[in-house]
Amino acid sequence: MAFSPVSSLLKQVLTQIGGDKYQPFILLYQGWKDVVGELLASRSHPFRFHDSVLYVAVQNNSWLQELYLRKAEILRQCRAMIPQEIRDIIFLIRS
């Protein structure tokens, strides 16, 4: 019997549960570390994608400011990751 990595199984399960409707968000969520780097990814995460706007939860004001300063680059990388339009990114402090 061949074993599959947990990450690939998780992706399959999320795709089956969410279907095509949530596929763009799933791709953004899973690729967040590649977009912002390991440090910022440990302090933030996408939590909603609605009406072409990506909402990102951030740990505190300091990290929110850092993400805001990189917003144009983050937006460019997110747009390259999924085919759906992303008009804006909104950063919110959430724990």
Image (cartoon, rainbow, N blue to C red):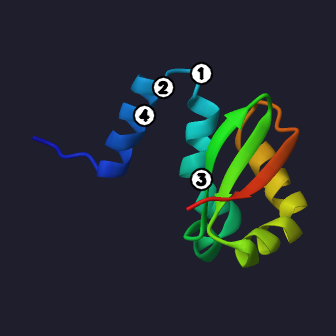
| Callout 4 touching callout 3 (CB < 8 Å) | no
Give the quarter of the image for residue 74.
bottom right
Extreme-top residue of the structure: 20
Q: Dot 3 surroundings within 10 Å: few (below 14), some, or many (20 or more)? A: some
- Left or right of 7, for residue 83: right
Q: Which numbered disc, 1 or 4, marks the residue that appears first in the sequence?
A: 4
Q: Amino acid at mark 1?
A: Lys
Q: Amino acid at mark 4?
A: Leu
- Left or right of 3, for residue 65: right
Q: Which numbered disc, 2 or 3, marks the residue that appears first in the sequence?
A: 2
Residue pointed to by mark 2:
18
In this view, 87 is above or below 40: above
SS at mark 2 in the image = helix
Find the distance from the CA under tag 4 to the CA under tag 2: 6 Å
Residue pointed to by mark 3:
31
Find the distance from the CA under tag 1 to the CA under tag 4: 11 Å
| Callout 2 touching callout 1 (CB < 8 Å) | yes
Residue in the image at 19% along x and 46% along y? 3
Considering the image in quadrants, where does the C terminus appear? bottom right
Find the distance from the CA under tag 2 to the CA under tag 3: 17 Å
Q: Which mark is residue 14?
A: 4
| Callout 1 touching callout 4 (CB < 8 Å) | no
Residue in the image at 75% along x and 48% along y? 78
Find the distance from the CA under tag 1 to the CA under tag 3: 17 Å
In this view, 79 is above or below 72: above
| Callout 4 touching callout 2 (CB < 8 Å) | yes
SS at mark 1 in the image = loop
Q: Which mark is residue 21?
A: 1
